[in-house]
Image: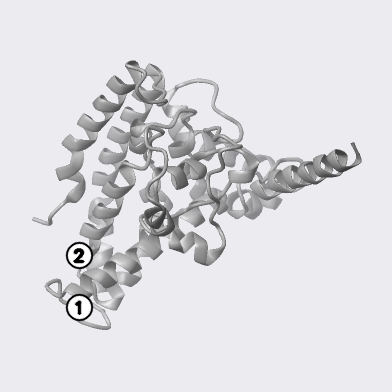
């Protein structure tokens, strides 16, 4: 049986959430919990686990098939191989995560993770039910083609998921500067979950924040602008089916209403519309930047 970091870490996840709730109740941290919101996150996490089991066979079969045609034989016993899979898997995660924000089809599978207006450890468990259907798992197939054993890929993906659990918190301010410079941290990831125009579509990192710095998507958290969490248009209730499927339903309605523009409504950026009447992240950022410039001009005149 393959070593599964997520299964081993699950008791820690539960204990950490309980500890964070207790500290919040004691006013020892600024973390906020809301019962219905936390329940939604936990149910989404359970559903994601079940969905993962349903598509797990397909993913494993596809990975094994690709691995049979591998370019190289990479040994699991070599230290260099683990360093290589760490870097390549983390780079793959960066592009998966960026794709999941920049194209609506994959955003529909990812948006539920951002739908909470609170930011705490339970938010980390608010995972997709439809990621397998969206097919983003295929982005990891090139690693098997290179010659990394499927078990090795699965282990490193699990390590990445375990790492990302602890960064979903407001209880930790900033880590040491050297750590913040290299690794993803609660501060960096709070920016990623924020809906402030300045912070939209930034900090896609899994473990290493260096990818965002390399590809121009890094944004530090600023003390003068606290993070506001959720999505641009927040959900009005905690209906679990809405949390899981609302963007798929909205996308289907758009395609039905405007079939000539179906490609744009499915594969364009979230918020795209054929007549420009809706707000994309790019448009919201542009509006915010224009307002900032106007404020600067006004302050100089005054």
Q: Is residue 126 left or right of residue 59?
A: right
Where disc 2 sits, the SS reads helix
Q: Tell me the quarter of the image containing the C terminus.
A: top right
Question: Which residue bears the numbered disc 2?
Answer: 152
Q: Earlier in the sequence, mark 1 or mark 2?
A: 1
Name the residue located 22 percent from the left edge and 69 percent from the top edge. Answer: 82
- Residue nearest the observer in this picture, 258 or 162: 162
Name the residue located 65 percent from the left edge and 43 percent from the top edge. Answer: 271
Q: Tell me the quarter of the image containing the N terminus.
A: bottom left
Circles 1 and 2 in contact, beta carbons < 8 Å: yes
Judge whether 187 appears above or below 153 on screen: above
Q: In the displayed image of the protein, which residue is found farthest to the bottom?
A: 71
C-alpha span from label 1 to label 2: 10 Å
Colouring convention used in this rendered image of the protein: one colour
Q: For label 2, count other residues whose C-alpha is less than 10 Å away and answer few (under 14), some (14-19) or many (20+).
A: many
Q: Which mark is residue 74?
A: 1
Residue 219: where, in percent of width, then height? Answer: 55, 51
- Residue nearest the observer in this picture, 48 or 196: 196
Where disc 1 sits, the SS reads loop
Residue 28: where, in percent of width, then height? Answer: 34, 22
Q: For label 1, count other residues whose C-alpha is less than 10 Å away and answer few (under 14), some (14-19) or many (20+).
A: some
């Amino acid at each position: 049986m393959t070593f599964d970091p997520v299964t081993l870490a699950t008791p820690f996840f539960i204990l950490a959430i309980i500890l964070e709730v207790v500290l919040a109740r004691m006013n020892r941290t600024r973390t906020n919990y809301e019962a219905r919101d936390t329940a939604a996150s936990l149910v989404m996490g359970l559903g994601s686990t079940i969905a993962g089991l349903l598509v797990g066979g397909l993913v494993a079969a596809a990975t094994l098939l690709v691995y049979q045609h591998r370019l190289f034989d990479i040994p699991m016993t070599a230290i260099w191989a683990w360093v290589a899979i760490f870097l390549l898997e983390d780079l793959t995660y960066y592009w998966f995560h960026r794709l999941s924000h920049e194209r609506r089809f994959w955003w529909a599978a990812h948006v539920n993770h951002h739908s909470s207006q609170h930011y705490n450890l339970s938010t980390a468990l608010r995972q997709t039910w439809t990621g397998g259907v969206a097919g983003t798992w295929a982005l990891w197939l090139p690693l098997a083609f290179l010659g990394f054993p499927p078990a090795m890929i699965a282990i490193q993906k699990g390590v990445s998921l375990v790492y990302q659990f602890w960064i979903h918190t407001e209880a930790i301010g900033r880590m040491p500067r050297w750590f913040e410079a290299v690794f993803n941290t609660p501060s960096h990831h709070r920016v990623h979950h924020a809906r402030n125009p300045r912070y939209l579509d930034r900090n896609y990192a899994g473990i290493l924040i260096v990818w965002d710095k390399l590809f121009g998507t890094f944004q530090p958290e600023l003390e003068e602008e606290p993070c506001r969490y959720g999505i641009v248009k927040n959900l009005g209730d905690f209906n679990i089916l809405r949390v899981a499927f609302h963007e798929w339903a909205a996308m289907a309605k758009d395609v039905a209403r405007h079939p000539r523009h179906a490609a744009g409504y499915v594969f364009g950026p979230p918020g795209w519309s054929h007549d420009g009447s809706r707000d994309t992240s790019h448009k919201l950022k542009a509006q915010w930047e224009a307002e900032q410039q106007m404020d600067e001009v006004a302050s100089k005149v005054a």
